[in-house]
Image (cartoon, grey):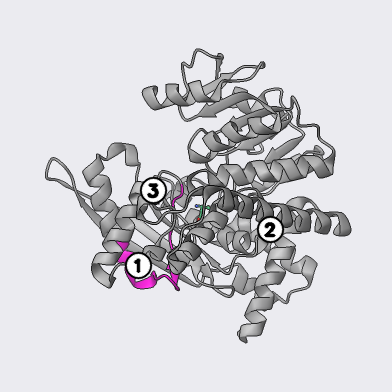
Amino acid sequence: MLDEVAGHHDPFAEVNETVSRACEIVGLPDDVRQIFCSTYREISVQIPLRRGDGSITVLRGYRVQHNGARGPYKGGIRYHPEASISEVRAMASLMTWKCAIVNLPYGGAKGGVMVDPKTLNESELEQLTRRFTLAISYVLGVNRDIPAPDVNTNAQIMAWIMDAYGSRYGHQPGIVTGKPVELGGSLGREAATGRGVVNVVAEAAHDLGIKLEGARVAIQGFGNVGYNAARLIRELGCNVVGISDASGGVLNPKGLDIDSLQAWTAEHGGVAGFTGGETGTNADLLACDCDILIPAALSNAITEENVGDVKARMVVEAANHPLSSEADDALVDMGVTVVPDILANAGGVTVSYLEWVQNIQQYRWTEDHVNRELASVMKRAWGEVYAYSQDHKLPLRDAAMCLSVARVARAAKLRGYI
Ligand code: GLU
């Protein structure tokens, strides 16, 4: 339904354009391309939610498993009114390629419930999570499909997923990642996506000769990923000169105080009104004078309408699919380096994998150990993608996708199904 409302914007078709191009470049036959441009299994469930006033709201939820050649399906669950089936398919496909690019033994999946969680109270959110979990539980499993946090979901929601699943099938902490540390979550998981983004920025800047000391960074989104990226990128000597979220934007060419902004946001529900900078809009943020722009919110943040305003030399996709295809092409034409989502934001699923490994071993690593593993995974992945892009004269997105489709095709071939 929402796909129709959104008109021409079909996220799955857009992801498939990149996948198809990569299949062609690496010489995969059309039948394999067709496997990669469709999903393996999709379940769509009804979630009747009893509201505080006694009425029932009927919600729709999905779990889409895209490709399992490399291992169990893996991917987050988002709660968002625009978590349409096409959006969830696109995100599931991106998870396949993301896990392949950082070489995790996983396939790709994604889940979504079409709801604005701000309209729910805590007990409605818990009830929704438990019902959705049980409704999709038939296709989940520690060795089958392992959910995680995504847009508007967090460690508490993962705890309810673990509990609901465990109440039916017996306690298994490895059924979901991104759990609270007290329930078997990994140290370092909360910050992992933002930390991985910063690891990639450090590697990219080194190879591309971008000076990080004093580099100006603008970040769209101040949720888990945007906040942690903002907090950690200062360690590279960068100045965060702008941040926006759904409430508006704040800009300060001298650099924002991230800790105060975080405290402000916790109190006021958004960055708008923060006194440590000038008030601006989301459009001002995307157009501001900066060296590195990090979209860390939702898909389709930069489109053909606003891409011309971008002044950054490097765009690092901390969100999944933040650029429309047109915007992506335009940035490449403008000479802007785009670090693609499947590489830039792979830190989250990488530490999810480390959490799953710790759960299976019933052992806990130190935060430092986790962070070092993460940095080495991100460094290796960046190095491989960058080298491929240099060798084949391709933008980083195409290079990353070529490496990924070749890895997934190889696994499928070895298993004997292509
Ligand atoms: N939702 C995150 C992503 O898009 C993490 C997925 C996971 O940890 O399984 O990469």
Instruction: Provide the residue designation for mark 1.
Output: 172
Q: Report the amino acid beneath label 3.
A: Ala
Residue drawn at the location 37% of the way across and 23% of the way down: 267
Mark 1 or 2, which is nearer the eye? 1
Quickly name the residue at label 2: 18
- Kindly indicate whether the residue at mark 1 contacts the one at mark 3 (C-beta within 8 angstroms): no
As displayed, is residue 14 above or below residue 218? below
What kind of element bears circle 3? helix
Local SS, label 1: loop
Front in this rendered view, residue 25 or 68: 68
> Disc 2 versus disc 3: distance between alpha carbons?
32 Å
Are there few (<14), some (14-19), or many (20+) residues within 10 Å of tag 3?
many
Q: Is residue 330 visible?
A: no
Camera-side residue: 337 or 164?
164
Which quarter shows the C terminus?
bottom right
Q: Earlier in the sequence, mark 1 or mark 2?
A: 2
Q: Which is nearer the eye, 4 or 364?
A: 364
Q: Is residue 237 above or below residue 168?
A: above
Seen at 66% across and 16% down, the residue is 254
Q: Secondary structure at mark 2?
A: helix
Q: Amino acid at mark 2?
A: Thr
Q: Residue furthest bottom?
A: 416
Cα separation, mark 3 vs mark 1, equals 16 Å
Seen at 61% across and 69% down, the residue is 36
Task: Please state the extent of the stretch shown in magenta in the rendering.
Answer: 133-150
